[in-house]
Amino acid sequence: MQQLDNKTASFGLSASIIILLSSIIVILKESSHSFHQALASITGNHWASQGVVDIVLFFALGFTFSKLNLKANTSIIVASVILSTALIVGYFF
């Protein structure tokens, strides 16, 4: 896999974390009515609240990581997507 520059690696790592976090939030929303309601109370819709959390954390983590000298490649994003898919599919089975 191709080596990424610092900004791309930083936001790629951020995306990987957000992908996993988003999967965990979906599982928590499906498992806990109170968590589902808490998210819904933030913006009026649980999906919108999840989107806001994801976007804010994506940029916060991306800019934080960009201050570090990260070395990463695209395989971390691929692994994150595969793991997240397995988590959600596993939960619903």
Image (spheres, rainbow, N blue to C red):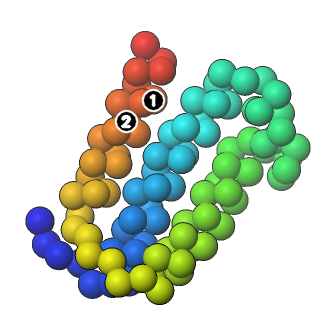
The amino acid type found where label 1 is placed reads Ile
Where is residue 52 shown, x and y percent of the image? 69, 59
Rounded to the nearest whole Å, what is the CA distance between mark 2 and mark 1?
5 Å
Instruction: Check disc 2 and report the residue beneath it.
Output: 85
* Residue 29 shown left or right of residue 41 in the figure: left
**Furthest residue to the left?**
1
Above-or-below relation of 5 to 17: below
Sort mark 1 into few (<14), some (14-19) or many (20+) by Cα contacts within 10 Å. some
Q: Residue at x 42, y 30 (%)?
A: 87
Q: Which mark is residue 46?
A: none
Q: Nearer the viewer, residue 44 or 21?
A: 21
Neighbour class for label 2 at 10 Å: few (<14), some, many (≥20)?
some
The quarter of the displayed image where residue 70 is located: bottom left
Q: Secondary structure at mark 2?
A: helix
Is residue 39 found left or right of 73 in the rendered image?
right
Residue drawn 83% across and 39% down? 38
Tell me the residue that label 1 is attached to.
88
Q: Which quarter of the rendering shows the C terminus? A: top left
Q: Secondary structure at mark 1?
A: helix
Q: Amino acid at mark 2?
A: Thr
User: How far from the left and from the top, in percent, is residue 45?
Assistant: 78, 44
Residue 60 spot, x, y in % from top left: 60, 73
Q: Is the C-beta separation of discs 2 and 1 under 8 Å? A: yes
